[in-house]
Amino acid sequence: MILDPRLEVFATHRTVRQYKAQPLETGHLEQLLFCAQHAPTDATAQMYSFIRLSDPALKARVAKITNNPHIETAAEAFIVCADVNRLQALLELKGYAFGDWSAVAVHFGIGDAVLAAHTMLVAAECLGYQGCWIGGVLGALEEIVTLCELPIGVLPFAGLTIGVPDESPEQRPRIQPELVLHENSYRLPSAAELEEALNRMASITARGDWAQTLSRYFAQGGTMEAREVVLQKVLEQQGFSHVSSDLNALMARAKKAGFPTILVRPTDTGFQAWIEQAGLAHGGEGVSAVAALEEAVQTAEQSLKASI
Ligand SMILES: Cc1cc2nc3c(=O)[nH]c(=O)nc-3n(C[C@H](O)[C@H](O)[C@H](O)COP(=O)(O)O)c2cc1C
């Protein structure tokens, strides 16, 4: 395929992890931020923030805990965050109660954050810099929240480094375009196409085995399972998981009503919940586990009231 010369910057993209000990040119950081801020943003809400790591000690610490040493040597390093804290403050300043939409906040907050930060990276590449996204942030999420003093409503997505490149790796391969572009409806890949994808990607791995590399991250026992536990905890801590807070609150209500045993199970149409004490149980059904448990707890609370 011949790339239109106007798209040349995309042919220059490489993730770079070795940087010269040189800062960005004067004025470039402001220009990169201008580009980032002019990425499209859902409902003009700009649900993201960047934490610029300019304190050398903080950079060094984040480099260590994310296992990405180049954070320390890059001219610029950022923690890219989904952010609905500022949006909530804006609304509350004018007397509006903030809505209950924590899953949507994850969806749009991360969407906005990625669009802005990747626009910044592409802009940096246009100026001759290179960079690296850092998902290693997920491996140190709780400490990063503490180190960067992130309030509720702010969730780190990843890190991003930008600097003057001191290595020039080959452009890394991608799977065949037919697997990522679907025509009107989703087309499942054939086994032969999957084999071809593995072959295309083999060269980026030391052993020529991309599946094995992927397995270290995504298979059973891989790093993502460990990250899942921490992410769920931090999602809740940062206010991005009302579902689990609702569940916790309902369980506390059931216990207070004298029903310490709780059973929830999926059915063909939704969920069923039972709360039990010796010889007595109340049930509920709903489209979600929360709705089913809510019904069971309400029934228990009503019968408790009636019996007083
Ligand atoms: C969300 C995200 C997280 C990433 N995390 C890391 C990381 O923690 N460390 C790292 O060295 N590279 C990281 N990368 C860079 C990828 O490894 C890189 O983009 C991929 O190997 C493809 O190489 P290329 O960007 O040079 O085409 C990340 C990339 C993305 C998009």
Image: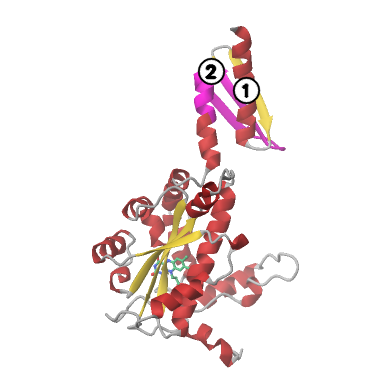
Q: Choose the circle earlier in sequence order: 1 or 2.
A: 2
Q: Residue reaching furthest top?
A: 308
Q: Secondary structure at mark 1?
A: helix
Q: How is the image coloured?
A: secondary structure
Quarter in which the C terminus is drawn? top right
* 152 to the left or right of 147: right
Identity of the residue drawn at 71% across and 64% down: 186
Q: Where on the picture, by quarter, is residue 7? A: bottom right
Residue 248 position (above or below residue 223): above
Residue closer to the observer: 113 or 99: 99
Magenta stretch: includes residue 264: yes
Instruction: Tell me the number on the disc at residue 239.
Output: none
Magenta stretch: includes residue 304: no
Quarter in which the N terminus is drawn? bottom right
On the image, the x and y values in percent for residue 139 come to: 38, 56
| Residue ID for mark 1 | 298
Residue closer to the observer: 182 or 91: 91
- Which amino acid type corresponds to the residue marked 1 in the rendered image? Gln
